[in-house]
Protein backbone atom coordinates (compact mmCIF):
# COMPACT_ATOMS: atom_id res chain seq x y z
CA UNK A 1 0.00 0.00 0.00
CA UNK A 2 2.82 2.41 0.88
CA UNK A 3 4.55 1.67 -2.42
CA UNK A 4 1.45 2.77 -4.30
CA UNK A 5 1.05 5.77 -1.97
CA UNK A 6 4.51 7.07 -2.90
CA UNK A 7 3.51 7.13 -6.56
CA UNK A 8 0.02 8.56 -5.98
CA UNK A 9 0.17 11.94 -7.69
CA UNK A 10 -2.89 11.70 -9.93
CA UNK A 11 -6.51 10.96 -9.10
CA UNK A 12 -6.23 7.55 -10.75
CA UNK A 13 -3.16 6.70 -8.70
CA UNK A 14 -4.91 7.75 -5.50
CA UNK A 15 -7.83 5.50 -6.40
CA UNK A 16 -5.33 2.67 -6.82
CA UNK A 17 -4.11 3.27 -3.25
CA UNK A 18 -7.69 3.08 -1.98
CA UNK A 19 -8.36 -0.05 -4.02
CA UNK A 20 -5.24 -1.68 -2.62
CA UNK A 21 -6.00 -0.79 1.02
CA UNK A 22 -9.71 -1.55 0.99
CA UNK A 23 -9.13 -4.66 -1.10
CA UNK A 24 -7.30 -6.18 1.87
CA UNK A 25 -10.68 -6.56 3.58
CA UNK A 26 -12.59 -8.25 0.75
CA UNK A 27 -11.83 -11.69 2.18
CA UNK A 28 -14.27 -10.88 4.97
CA UNK A 29 -17.13 -10.44 2.45
CA UNK A 30 -17.26 -6.74 3.24
CA UNK A 31 -18.37 -4.20 0.68
CA UNK A 32 -16.10 -1.31 -0.19
CA UNK A 33 -18.76 1.04 1.17
CA UNK A 34 -18.48 -0.56 4.60
CA UNK A 35 -14.67 -0.39 4.63
CA UNK A 36 -14.75 3.24 3.51
CA UNK A 37 -17.21 4.13 6.24
CA UNK A 38 -15.11 2.36 8.87
CA UNK A 39 -11.95 4.10 7.63
CA UNK A 40 -13.53 7.52 8.13
CA UNK A 41 -15.18 6.52 11.42
CA UNK A 42 -11.73 5.55 12.74
CA UNK A 43 -10.68 9.19 12.29
CA UNK A 44 -8.80 9.00 8.98
CA UNK A 45 -9.36 11.37 6.08
CA UNK A 46 -10.39 9.75 2.82
CA UNK A 47 -9.18 12.65 0.61
CA UNK A 48 -5.78 12.45 2.36
CA UNK A 49 -5.55 8.68 2.11
CA UNK A 50 -2.27 8.60 0.14
CA UNK A 51 -0.56 10.93 2.61
CA UNK A 52 -2.00 9.02 5.57
CA UNK A 53 -0.56 5.77 4.26
CA UNK A 54 2.93 7.27 4.23
CA UNK A 55 2.64 8.07 7.95
CA UNK A 56 0.65 4.96 8.93
CA UNK A 57 1.88 3.48 12.21
CA UNK A 58 1.34 0.08 13.78
CA UNK A 59 -1.17 1.69 16.14
CA UNK A 60 -3.13 3.14 13.19
CA UNK A 61 -3.25 -0.27 11.55
CA UNK A 62 -4.52 -1.97 14.72
CA UNK A 63 -7.09 0.80 15.17
CA UNK A 64 -8.43 0.39 11.63
CA UNK A 65 -8.63 -3.40 11.95
CA UNK A 66 -10.30 -3.19 15.38
CA UNK A 67 -12.92 -0.74 14.10
CA UNK A 68 -13.54 -2.90 11.03
CA UNK A 69 -14.01 -6.07 13.09
CA UNK A 70 -16.41 -4.31 15.42
CA UNK A 71 -18.50 -3.06 12.49
CA UNK A 72 -18.31 -6.21 10.36
CA UNK A 73 -18.54 -8.82 13.10
CA UNK A 74 -20.49 -7.42 16.07
CA UNK A 75 -20.60 -9.99 18.83
CA UNK A 76 -23.36 -11.15 21.13
CA UNK A 77 -22.27 -13.67 23.76
CA UNK A 78 -24.63 -16.59 24.40
CA UNK A 79 -24.24 -17.65 28.05
CA UNK A 80 -25.38 -21.22 27.55
CA UNK A 81 -26.21 -23.89 30.17
CA UNK A 82 -27.95 -21.50 32.56
CA UNK A 83 -29.87 -24.48 33.94
CA UNK A 84 -26.88 -25.66 36.00
CA UNK A 85 -26.98 -24.67 39.71
CA UNK A 86 -23.96 -22.31 39.66
CA UNK A 87 -25.15 -20.44 36.55
CA UNK A 88 -27.01 -17.51 38.15
CA UNK A 89 -24.03 -15.80 39.88
CA UNK A 90 -21.86 -16.35 36.79
CA UNK A 91 -24.48 -14.79 34.54
CA UNK A 92 -24.67 -11.75 36.81
CA UNK A 93 -20.87 -11.43 36.79
CA UNK A 94 -20.77 -11.60 33.00
CA UNK A 95 -23.54 -9.02 32.66
CA UNK A 96 -21.62 -6.56 34.80
CA UNK A 97 -18.75 -6.72 32.32
CA UNK A 98 -20.54 -7.19 29.00
CA UNK A 99 -23.90 -5.55 29.67
CA UNK A 100 -26.51 -6.17 26.98
CA UNK A 101 -23.95 -7.92 24.78
CA UNK A 102 -24.57 -11.19 26.60
CA UNK A 103 -27.77 -13.23 26.83
CA UNK A 104 -28.50 -16.16 29.19
CA UNK A 105 -29.38 -19.22 27.11
CA UNK A 106 -30.45 -22.79 27.73
CA UNK A 107 -30.23 -24.60 24.41
CA UNK A 108 -31.04 -27.93 26.06
CA UNK A 109 -34.43 -26.69 27.29
CA UNK A 110 -35.15 -25.08 23.91
CA UNK A 111 -34.51 -28.38 22.16
CA UNK A 112 -36.66 -30.24 24.71
CA UNK A 113 -39.57 -27.87 24.10
CA UNK A 114 -39.16 -28.02 20.32
CA UNK A 115 -38.85 -31.81 20.24
CA UNK A 116 -41.85 -32.45 22.47
CA UNK A 117 -43.95 -29.94 20.57
CA UNK A 118 -43.04 -31.80 17.37
CA UNK A 119 -44.21 -35.03 19.02
CA UNK A 120 -47.50 -33.42 20.04
CA UNK A 121 -46.85 -33.56 23.80
CA UNK A 122 -47.08 -29.77 24.27
CA UNK A 123 -47.52 -26.41 22.58
CA UNK A 124 -44.94 -23.67 22.95
CA UNK A 125 -44.48 -20.16 21.59
CA UNK A 126 -40.92 -19.39 20.46
CA UNK A 127 -39.16 -16.92 22.73
CA UNK A 128 -41.94 -16.87 25.30
CA UNK A 129 -41.91 -17.91 28.95
CA UNK A 130 -43.52 -20.54 31.12
CA UNK A 131 -47.03 -19.20 30.53
CA UNK A 132 -46.87 -20.11 26.82
CA UNK A 133 -46.18 -23.81 27.45
CA UNK A 134 -49.27 -26.01 27.50
CA UNK A 135 -48.71 -29.68 28.32
CA UNK A 136 -51.10 -32.04 26.56
CA UNK A 137 -53.31 -34.22 28.75
CA UNK A 138 -52.11 -37.23 26.75
CA UNK A 139 -48.42 -36.43 27.29
CA UNK A 140 -46.36 -39.27 28.85
CA UNK A 141 -45.71 -39.12 32.59
CA UNK A 142 -41.97 -38.62 32.09
CA UNK A 143 -42.61 -35.51 29.97
CA UNK A 144 -44.74 -34.00 32.74
CA UNK A 145 -42.01 -34.75 35.29
CA UNK A 146 -39.30 -33.25 33.10
CA UNK A 147 -41.39 -30.11 32.63
CA UNK A 148 -41.40 -29.58 36.40
CA UNK A 149 -37.58 -29.50 36.42
CA UNK A 150 -37.45 -27.08 33.49
CA UNK A 151 -39.92 -24.51 34.83
CA UNK A 152 -37.60 -22.87 37.43
CA UNK A 153 -35.04 -21.88 34.78
CA UNK A 154 -37.67 -20.40 32.47
CA UNK A 155 -39.30 -18.53 35.36
CA UNK A 156 -35.99 -17.01 36.47
CA UNK A 157 -34.70 -15.94 33.04
CA UNK A 158 -38.04 -15.41 31.29
CA UNK A 159 -37.34 -17.75 28.38
CA UNK A 160 -34.76 -20.18 27.01
CA UNK A 161 -32.95 -17.17 25.50
CA UNK A 162 -32.38 -18.83 22.12
CA UNK A 163 -34.66 -16.57 20.09
CA UNK A 164 -33.49 -13.49 22.00
CA UNK A 165 -29.79 -14.08 21.37
CA UNK A 166 -30.41 -14.72 17.66
CA UNK A 167 -32.59 -11.61 17.40
CA UNK A 168 -29.98 -9.44 19.07
CA UNK A 169 -27.29 -10.80 16.76
CA UNK A 170 -29.38 -9.91 13.70
CA UNK A 171 -30.10 -6.43 15.05
CA UNK A 172 -26.38 -5.83 15.46
CA UNK A 173 -26.17 -6.03 11.68
CA UNK A 174 -29.75 -5.17 10.77
CA UNK A 175 -30.37 -5.94 7.08
CA UNK A 176 -31.70 -3.44 4.58
CA UNK A 177 -35.28 -4.26 3.62
CA UNK A 178 -35.94 -3.63 -0.07
CA UNK A 179 -39.45 -3.74 -1.53
CA UNK A 180 -39.22 -3.91 -5.33
CA UNK A 181 -42.18 -2.31 -7.10
CA UNK A 182 -43.29 -1.58 -10.66
CA UNK A 183 -45.31 1.53 -9.78
CA UNK A 184 -44.80 4.11 -7.03
CA UNK A 185 -48.47 5.10 -7.04
CA UNK A 186 -50.04 1.70 -6.51
CA UNK A 187 -46.92 0.13 -4.95
CA UNK A 188 -47.65 -3.03 -6.91
CA UNK A 189 -44.93 -5.61 -6.20
CA UNK A 190 -42.47 -6.57 -8.91
CA UNK A 191 -43.65 -10.17 -8.68
CA UNK A 192 -47.02 -11.61 -7.67
CA UNK A 193 -47.42 -14.26 -4.98
CA UNK A 194 -46.60 -17.61 -6.59
CA UNK A 195 -49.37 -19.57 -4.83
CA UNK A 196 -52.29 -17.12 -4.81
CA UNK A 197 -51.36 -14.73 -7.61
CA UNK A 198 -52.09 -11.84 -5.22
CA UNK A 199 -50.33 -8.54 -5.68
CA UNK A 200 -50.95 -6.61 -2.47
CA UNK A 201 -48.92 -3.39 -2.16
CA UNK A 202 -45.34 -3.96 -1.00
CA UNK A 203 -45.95 -7.72 -0.68
CA UNK A 204 -42.52 -8.56 -2.13
CA UNK A 205 -39.28 -8.03 -0.25
CA UNK A 206 -35.60 -8.95 -0.36
CA UNK A 207 -33.00 -8.56 2.39
CA UNK A 208 -29.60 -7.03 1.70
CA UNK A 209 -26.49 -6.40 3.73
CA UNK A 210 -26.10 -2.92 5.28
CA UNK A 211 -24.56 -0.39 2.88
CA UNK A 212 -25.54 -2.44 -0.16
CA UNK A 213 -25.53 -0.58 -3.47
CA UNK A 214 -28.10 -0.33 -6.24
CA UNK A 215 -25.91 -2.67 -8.28
CA UNK A 216 -26.04 -5.31 -5.52
CA UNK A 217 -29.82 -4.91 -5.23
CA UNK A 218 -30.16 -5.34 -9.00
CA UNK A 219 -28.02 -8.50 -8.90
CA UNK A 220 -30.13 -9.91 -6.04
CA UNK A 221 -33.36 -9.20 -7.91
CA UNK A 222 -32.03 -10.96 -11.00
CA UNK A 223 -30.86 -13.90 -8.91
CA UNK A 224 -34.33 -14.23 -7.36
CA UNK A 225 -35.84 -13.95 -10.85
CA UNK A 226 -37.67 -10.68 -10.21
CA UNK A 227 -35.89 -9.16 -13.21
CA UNK A 228 -34.35 -10.10 -16.52
CA UNK A 229 -32.13 -8.17 -18.88
CA UNK A 230 -29.60 -5.39 -18.36
CA UNK A 231 -29.79 -2.50 -15.92
CA UNK A 232 -31.22 0.74 -17.36
CA UNK A 233 -32.43 2.90 -14.48
CA UNK A 234 -33.27 2.79 -10.77
CA UNK A 235 -35.41 5.01 -8.58
CA UNK A 236 -36.33 5.02 -4.88
CA UNK A 237 -39.43 6.44 -3.23
CA UNK A 238 -38.32 9.23 -0.91
CA UNK A 239 -41.61 10.32 0.59
CA UNK A 240 -44.76 8.21 0.99
CA UNK A 241 -47.14 11.18 1.13
CA UNK A 242 -45.92 13.20 -1.85
CA UNK A 243 -44.67 10.15 -3.80
CA UNK A 244 -41.45 12.01 -4.58
CA UNK A 245 -38.72 9.86 -6.06
CA UNK A 246 -34.98 10.03 -6.67
CA UNK A 247 -32.92 8.54 -9.47
CA UNK A 248 -30.12 6.30 -8.18
CA UNK A 249 -26.80 5.39 -9.76
CA UNK A 250 -25.45 1.86 -9.75
CA UNK A 251 -22.85 2.70 -7.09
CA UNK A 252 -25.26 4.60 -4.80
CA UNK A 253 -25.80 3.10 -1.35
CA UNK A 254 -29.35 2.07 -0.49
CA UNK A 255 -31.12 2.88 2.75
CA UNK A 256 -28.35 4.53 4.76
CA UNK A 257 -30.85 5.04 7.60
CA UNK A 258 -32.90 1.93 6.87
CA UNK A 259 -30.64 -0.29 8.98
CA UNK A 260 -31.38 1.87 12.02
CA UNK A 261 -35.05 2.68 11.49
CA UNK A 262 -36.14 -0.61 9.92
CA UNK A 263 -37.99 1.39 7.25
CA UNK A 264 -37.93 -0.45 3.92
CA UNK A 265 -36.44 0.94 0.73
CA UNK A 266 -39.06 1.04 -2.02
CA UNK A 267 -37.12 0.46 -5.21
CA UNK A 268 -38.08 0.53 -8.88
CA UNK A 269 -35.61 -0.89 -11.39
CA UNK A 270 -35.98 -0.67 -15.14
CA UNK A 271 -34.27 -3.09 -17.49
CA UNK A 272 -34.25 -3.69 -21.22
CA UNK A 273 -36.53 -6.71 -20.71
CA UNK A 274 -39.87 -6.97 -18.92
CA UNK A 275 -40.07 -8.24 -15.32
CA UNK A 276 -41.77 -11.55 -14.72
Image (cartoon, rainbow, N blue to C red):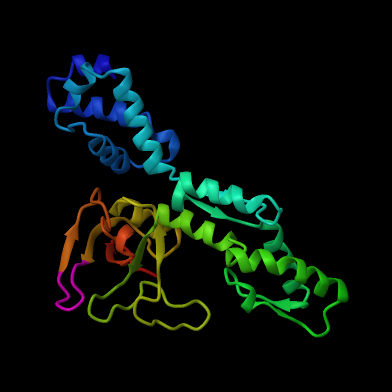
Res. 230 image quadrant:
bottom left
Q: Position of residue 87 (x, y in %)?
A: 65, 51
Instruction: Mark yes or no: residue 76 visible.
Output: no
What is the x, y in percent for residue 45? 17, 32
Q: Nearer the viewer, residue 134 or 60?
A: 134
Quadrant of the image occupied by residue 57:
top left
**Residue segment shown in magenta:** 237-244
In the image: residue 178, left or right of residue 100: left
Please tell me whether residue 149 belongs to the stretch shown in magenta: no
* Majority SS type along the magenta span: loop
Corner quadrant of residue 22 = top left
Which quadrant of the figure contains the C terminus? bottom left
**Residue 205 horizontal side relative to residue 248, left or right:** right
State the residue at coordinates (23%, 75%).
184
Number of marks in picture:
0
Residue 88 location, x and y as percent? 62, 54
226 vs 32: above or below: below
Please name the residue shown 33% across and 18% down the image: 58
Q: Nearer the viewer, residue 216 or 154?
A: 154
Is residue 205 found left or right of 122 in the rendered image?
A: left
Residue drawn at x 16%, y 63% is 246
Locate the N terminus by quadrant. top left
Instruction: Determine the residue located farthest toward the right in the rendered image.
Output: 141
> Do we see residue 26 in this rendering?
yes
Residue 240 highlighted magenta (yes or no): yes
Q: Residue at x 19, y 27 (%)?
A: 49
Amino acid sequence: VRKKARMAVSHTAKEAVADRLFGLFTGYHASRQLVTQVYEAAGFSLPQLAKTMMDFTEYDLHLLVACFLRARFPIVVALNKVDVPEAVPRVEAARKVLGDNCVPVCARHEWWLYDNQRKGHLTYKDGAGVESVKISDSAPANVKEQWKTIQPTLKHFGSTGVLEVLSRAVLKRRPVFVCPTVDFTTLEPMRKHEATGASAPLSAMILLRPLSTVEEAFSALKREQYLRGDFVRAEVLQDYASKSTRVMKREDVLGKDSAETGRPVILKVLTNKKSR
